[in-house]
Image (cartoon, rainbow, N blue to C red):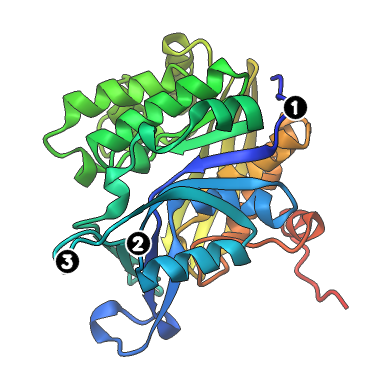
Amino acid sequence: MKIRQNAKYDLLVLTSMGVRITPADRQPVAASHRFEMYSTSAETNVANIPASLGKRVKVLTRFVAGSPIAAFIKGELRKRGLEYEGKEIAQGGPFGYRHQFNIADSGYGGRRPVVQNDRAGEVGRTIAPEDFDLERIFGEEGCKVLHLSGLIAALSPETGRCCVELAKAARAQGTLVSFDLNYRASFWEKRQEELRGVFSEIASQADLLIGNEEDFQLALGLKGPAAGEKPEGTEEFRELILRAREQFPQAGVFSTTLRTVESANRHRWGALLLADGKWYEEAQREIEVYDRIGGGDAYVGGLLYGLLNGWEPQRWMEFGWACGALAATLATDYAQPASEEEIWSIYRGNARVKR
């Protein structure tokens, strides 16, 4: 897979920024009085891995003008080494625009995590391709990889159109396009036909397609295991990916994470990758979990970091697996690796103290 070299940015992501509010001490939302707040989005969770390890990364988005929440988000992006670009939209009164709120607890033992998305009036739903000078971004400045996800693609008709236009503009300039399908049933309600077309159009521009068996079936209409069923092994999923490759032959990389939930604190975690016709698999092994949200995004971030470094696909997958395992140990839904060595230590299972 050829990576463009004459580029200002290693990675660009399109996203709708918000805040994540979580109870302290892993308590359930309904029984809590103390909460912590973080700046969040699925796409910046991906971007945070390469940015933390020295890659130049930019976020394309929209903000509410004069909002203290927008100021908080911008400050957090700067702290995480993420550049940003986006229009400032007036709030328009108390019933106007705002940034999304994601209210979530981590679960504990047999008590599962619960996530409540509050996205009414979300300014990110208004993001449009006209917000951005695509010739400057992808032509003059240049970018090696554009990453899109199904969350921003399904947010509104405008964001879906924006994802399609960005993918086309990126591909025309030699930028690799990564698409994590991220199907969410609540986003698709009464919009199945519309979104199936949008997702298929984005997928037709993608060089990397990422998702689980439900994502590929429900987002792209591919035949696979019955809805709600998990394949016993990886063979059924491999067959599903091969069908995806037939439908989207321009894509050279397909990947998914493999997760078995034993309790809120203990998962079995693995990965599967098809790159340029060759299979790679990271068998599931047990990991400890503080908070599961963001593990899949961190996997994608680690995979893209390995790709940007010119590593072999086996190492992309291994590094991504360990980035996801790192994210699972954190209260945030994004990981901030201090070094490559930290990630490889997790992969090797070396949790001994480093002095």
Relative placement, left or right, of 310 versus 231 is: right
Q: Nearer the viewer, residue 352 or 29?
A: 29
Crowd class of label 2 (few under 14; some 14 to 19; many from 20; radius 10 Å)? some
Residue appearing at x 77%, y 37% in the figure: 309
Disc 1 marks a residue whose amino acid type is Asn
Residue at mark 1 to residue at mark 3: CA–CA distance: 44 Å
Between residue 208 and residue 130, name the one nearer to us: 130
In front of the other: 19 or 58: 58
The number of callouts visible is 3
| Location of mark 1 (residue) | 6
Disc 1/disc 2 C-alpha distance (Å): 34 Å
Three-letter residue code for mark 2 = Ala
Within the image, what quadrant is residue 308 found in?
top right
Residue 14: percent from left, percent from top: 45, 42
Q: Taking 280 as reference, is 81 above or below it?
A: below
User: Residue 101: which quarter of the image?
Assistant: bottom left
Indicate the amino acid at tag 3. Answer: Gly
Q: From the viewer's perspective, is the residue at label 1 or at label 2 nearer?
A: 2
Report the residue at 46% width, 36% height from top.
148
Which badge, 1 or 2, is on the more N-terminal residue? 1
**Coordinates of residue 16 in the picture (x, y in percent):** 38, 50
**Element under disc 2:** loop
